[in-house]
Image (cartoon, rainbow, N blue to C red):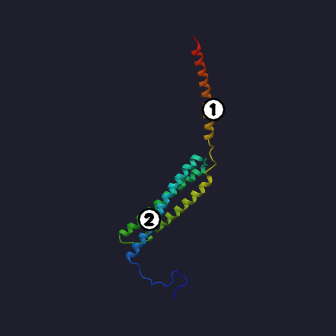
Amino acid sequence: MPEADDPYGPTAPAMAATAQDRSAAVAIAVTLSGQLSTAVLAMIAVWGALATYIFDKRSPSGLFYVLYFGVFLIFVLSVYKGGRGVSKTCGAGFHGKWSLEVGKRCFGQQAFFALLGLVLLVISLLFIGAPKEDTTEAAIQELRKQAAETNEVIRHLTDRVGVIESKP
């Protein structure tokens, strides 16, 4: 009779995990850590592209800059913790001690820092500031004014050349 707590129904009697089972479990954990690191690195790239837009088009507050650099450092820390967990786990496995417990703390910290970085990234968007003044239209008006002045000078010089040519 299956236990009420067991969502998978009846299971085989508990057996001790073999070294091969533990090795496979460690391989899965290491793969998941690598995928999380890849996702965090992608978020760094997205954050960099977003920051380029913000620095160009907005006037961010000082708190935005603090959060901006904090998010970057937290993402880097997440990748570091994942790498540290992989290193510890593989090092133990090299010595025949395949265990998820060796790198479990580092993997947990990696996930925590990845999530924290994502949350802080979203919060930092609240402090991007007001849009910068678009100076394009003002620059166009200034160029039109300068062109009109230049045309007036050209007309004046053309008239003077005509007067000089008409003199005997």
Q: Compared to 105, does 166 lie above or below? A: above
Q: Compared to 157, does 23 lie above or below? A: below
Where disc 2 sits, the SS reads: helix
> Where is residue 124 shown, x and y percent of the image?
59, 55
Q: Which residue is mark 2?
A: 85
Tell me what residue is drawn at x 36 percent, y 72 percent. 96
Tell me what residue is drawn at x 62 percent, y 30 percent. 148
Q: Residues within 10 Å of mark 2 (few under 14, many from 20)?
A: many
Tell me what residue is drawn at x 55 percent, y 61 percent. 116
Where disc 1 sits, the SS reads: helix
Tell me what residue is drawn at x 60 percent, y 54 percent. 125
Q: Which residue is mark 1?
A: 145
Seen in the image, is 96 located left or right of residue 50?
Answer: left
**Residue most extreme to the top:** 168
The amino acid marked with disc number 1 is Lys
Q: Quadrant of residue 136?
A: top right
